[in-house]
Image: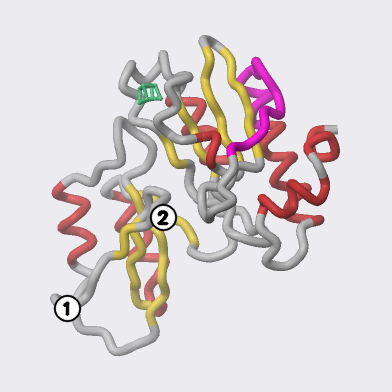
Amino acid sequence: MEDSGKKVKIAINGGIGFGAKLNAKQLITLSKYMNEDEELELTTFQQLYIEIPESNIEEIIEEFQSVGLACYPVGNFVKSLRTCNFCKGEEEEGMPVAKELNRRIAGKPVPFTLKVAYTGCPIGCGEPMLSDIGVMKIRDHYHLYAGGKAKGKDAEVGSLLKENLTPEELYETVEKIIEVYSEEGKKRETFYKFFKRVGSDYLIS
Ligand code: SF4
């Protein structure tokens, strides 16, 4: 594809499903917007970065969505939910809840990139304990963790904030935490630092 105009980086993935996969049709669609010497960047939070022409960004995103690709902004936003592979099945592992949570929070502006992870059982393949916010399904309810830090020599597991939430309670609590961080976090303050500064009681009071 030849285009000398300005390009914008967007994040894409195949949406929430059984594993982080892309099908052939999606790959063909993406390749239409790439020159042979261009690359897709694979991030650690199950997103690919692609640069597309700014002049027709809306039509391209619509085209991506028509083949089942999910598109998100890049930068200081809530990332799309990083999930486990739902190996025990869609309903048992709460995939509809993960999808709804993602729909509500992904792409919201925050002081610094915020990573939220979801895992369908206590085995925890989605690594919720090491994310800014982590959700773990336990039987029919959800445990919520926050303040994990995956990077650095001072990596830390998150703290359990709430146990046995219903889906609605989970959505409301996560949305409220993100709202507080969004409004009261300092510019470029990571959620980890914000969490240490304000404390868990303040976030869920
Ligand atoms: S966290 Fe549980 S449901 Fe999800 S992939 Fe791992 S074992 Fe399967």
Disc 1, SS: loop
Q: Position of residue 154 (x, y in %)?
A: 59, 51
Amino acid of disc 2: Cys
**Tag 1: residue type?**
Asp
Residue labelled 2 has its Cβ within 8 Å of some atom of ligand 1: no
Q: How was this image coloured?
A: secondary structure
Which quarter of the rendered picture does the N terminus lie within? bottom left
The dot on residue 96 is none
For image coordinates 39% across by 52% down, the residue present is 44
What residue is at 69 percent from the left and 24 percent from the top?
A: 169
Above or below 18: residue 138: above
| Beta carbon of the mark 1 residue lies under 8 A of ligand 1 | no
**Relative to residue 104, is residue 3 depicted above or below?**
below
- Identify the residue at horizontal 70%, vertical 62% (top origin): 189
CA separation, marks 2 and 1?
23 Å
In the image, which is nearer the foreground, mark 2 or mark 1? 1
Residue identified by numbered label 2: 71
Q: Which residue is mark 1?
A: 37
* Span colored in magenta: 157-171
Q: Are marks 2 and 1 in contact (CB under 8 Å)?
A: no
Q: Is residue 188 left or right of residue 149?
A: right
Q: Secondary structure at mark 2?
A: strand
* Residue found farthest to the bottom: 4
